[in-house]
Amino acid sequence: MWPLLHHEIRFASVDATEVNVTVQLAKDDLKPLPWKADAWWITADRIQTTSLRRLQWSDLQLTGPTTAMLGFTHQLRGGITRIFASDIRSRQGVLVYGAHWRSQDVDFNLHFSSDPFTHDQPPGWRKLERATLHLTFEGSTPAMNLGAAPAPGQQGGTGSNRDGHLSADITLDHGVLVEGGQAHWKGMIAAADANGIARREWGEGIVVVRKDDVDGHLSIPATHAADPLASDHLALDMSFASQRMLPVRSSSETLKLLSGSVAGHWHFASLAWLKPLASKKPWLQWDGAGEVDTALHIDHGHLLPGSRLDVPRLDLVANLLGNRFSGAASAKGSVVTGSKGATSVMNMSVRKFVLSPVSSPSQPYLRGAAMQLDLRSSDDLSKFRDTALAHLQFRDAEVPDLQAYNHYLPGKSLFFVAGHGRMSTDLNIDGEGDVSAGRMQMRTQGAQIALGASRLTGNLNMDTQLAVAKRTGHAFDLRHFTLSMDGVQMDGANDPSWWTTITLERGRLDWDRPMQLDAMATMRMKNVSVLLALFAKRSAFPAWIGHIVDDGEAQVTSRIQAGRGEFVMDDLQASNKRIQFLARLRIADGKPDGDVYARWGLLSVGVALANDQRQFHWAHAASWYQAQPALLPPLAGQAAKPRGG
């Protein structure tokens, strides 16, 4: 009666046969009912079986002759749980972890117990901090695969499940590894030579728990050191400066406890595993088969001078501004010292590359013979990804077809009709994979440009410096943007070739599709003939308009905006000593409309353009023009000014 008075159901001994146990993670946290002090207890002093047929915990499964004994007490409604001294013993068992691992002939002993815990405290896996576990393990293992893959047509697989042997004797006491624990593995390593032909090496690894740290060693000797195609070897000696494994530390805290060295040469079927090491976001990716030759020296998470990493060949992809740079590259990493301490440097040389939209990687619009991508970061491995800065540059790459850039331009209002050119670029990239500053230069010959209904043919040269704007997305402040055109001819016009130089000031560029540009521009141009032709043919104007065209070089200012299917020039003012030319022009979906005022001496005219119709204003042309509304609001921080002022 005593257990009943204390709300307890107690089993002194339970024998079970033909037992299968499966533990799977639930999709949702199954919260117990609210706790009550008088909730019932369930206690089993000893549940035992000599026929545990299968024990499965998620993807980990143990089968074979197994015995188990478990004791526990638990209060319902989320009360205390405590596990008494318990054990699981297997002889000649089979231990499988999904499709990744299979050990046979396993002798497995696990002894465990715990201090009291509840459903909520400690949470999750931290309950192991209340437990003591002692594991001994003896069993065969498959060969270890370190990134090798057979060549096409060659037999796959890594051999039998008895290519290695693992023995372990480890105790974890309330989250702390106990001194004297160790694990020892010896067996075959699946490797590949430089031709991708699968081969096998012997390897040996050992982990030992010492008084103040945990030491690990892995050695893979080359079987034929004289054969350059069989030179894979690896030696790893690491020390982890703590025996405490729980609670689980952050990756940053874990790296600061690592010291040791890694040296070797290894061929990998894929280098994709290096992706997360280079940057916080996956803008920079390595892939393809390749060799890694390395000698790294680490002291409490810091790479030491003399460390190096060489990758003679890799497939590099860099995603920037919605575009993808890709090509075959080589990489050399090192640690250099300077006035501000040590810095990790990775220099990547791309022999040939293409640039294409991320959404259409098979349609490149830039091809280059050489590109350099340099990565600099802290020597502190815990800060490496957060402090990584990159510098990308190439010169004189081929732009085979300017029409490929039309998806950045405002549709039918402004686009390339034909042409090709060359481009040079110098970009600074932050750890998020965003361009923080840079310079872009492009030159073309015989570029054909559509500006609304007008067609221009000429040589185009662009030079711009970018500085990241304090906005989200791909927004930049333009600095020193210069666009020059020469040898320009307008279809249907008989004027001599024309030239202009355009400089954008206080410009903002949103590098999306389509690109959006808003800036103040100053221009020098041979004359205003092209501006006039955007409104009407010269024959539509009175004869004196020819003096405006022929009166020579003009200085021009204008507000320019492009994007979302429109190209706008507002508050355009052109003048020299004898003429005045004022205009505003909006080209929307390829159709121009706007107003223009032209004066030569005492003669003047105003023209309103809308729906392909022109209305001329001869009397009081200046007053008429000034009365027309602006097309755009003032730029931020700029007050509106009178038309023509």
Image: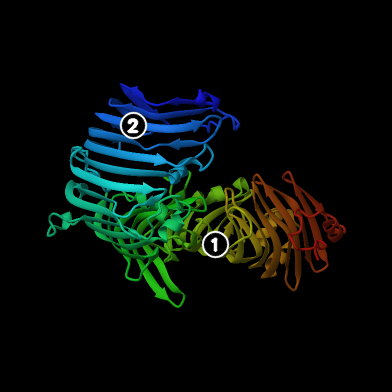
Regarding residue 371, the answer to whether it shows in the image is yes
Can you say whether 407 is above or below 211 in the image? above
* Image spot of residue 50 (x, y percent): 28, 26
Closer to the camera, 409 or 188? 188
Can you say whether 172 is above or below 496 in the image? above
Q: Find numbered disc 2 in the image and state the secondary structure of the residue it sits on.
A: strand
The type of residue carrying mark 1 is: Ser
Instruction: Bin the neighbour count of mark 1 within 10 Å (Cα to Cα): few under 14, some 14-19, many 20 and up.
Output: many
Can you say whether 9 is above or below 562 in the image? above
The type of residue carrying mark 2 is: Met
Task: Tell me if 491 is positioned left or right of 136 in this view.
Answer: right
Q: Count the marks.
A: 2
Image quarter where the C terminus lies is bottom right
* Image spot of residue 1 (x, y percent): 51, 22
Q: Residue at x 52, y 24 (%)?
A: 4
Task: Tell me if 638 is positioned left or right of 5 in this view.
Answer: right
Q: Residue at x 53, y 42 (%)?
A: 121
| Comes first in the chain, label 2 or label 1 | 2
Closer to the camera, 72 or 340? 72
Which of the 4 image quadrants contains residue 7? top right
* Image spot of residue 538 (x, y percent): 70, 56
Q: Which residue is drawn at 76% across and 53% down?
A: 631
The residue pinned by badge 1 equals: 436
* Image spot of residue 31 (x, y percent): 55, 32
Q: Residue at x 22, y 48 (%)?
A: 185
The residue pinned by badge 2 equals: 69
Q: Do the residues labelled 2 and 1 touch (CB within 8 Å)?
A: no
Can you say whether 115 is above or below 579 in the image? above
Query: From this viewpoint, which residue is outermost toward the front?
Result: 1
Which of the 4 image quadrants contains residue 394? bottom left
Q: Find numbered disc 1 in the image and state the secondary structure of the residue it sits on.
A: strand
Task: Tell me the CA gap for discs 2 and 1.
Answer: 62 Å
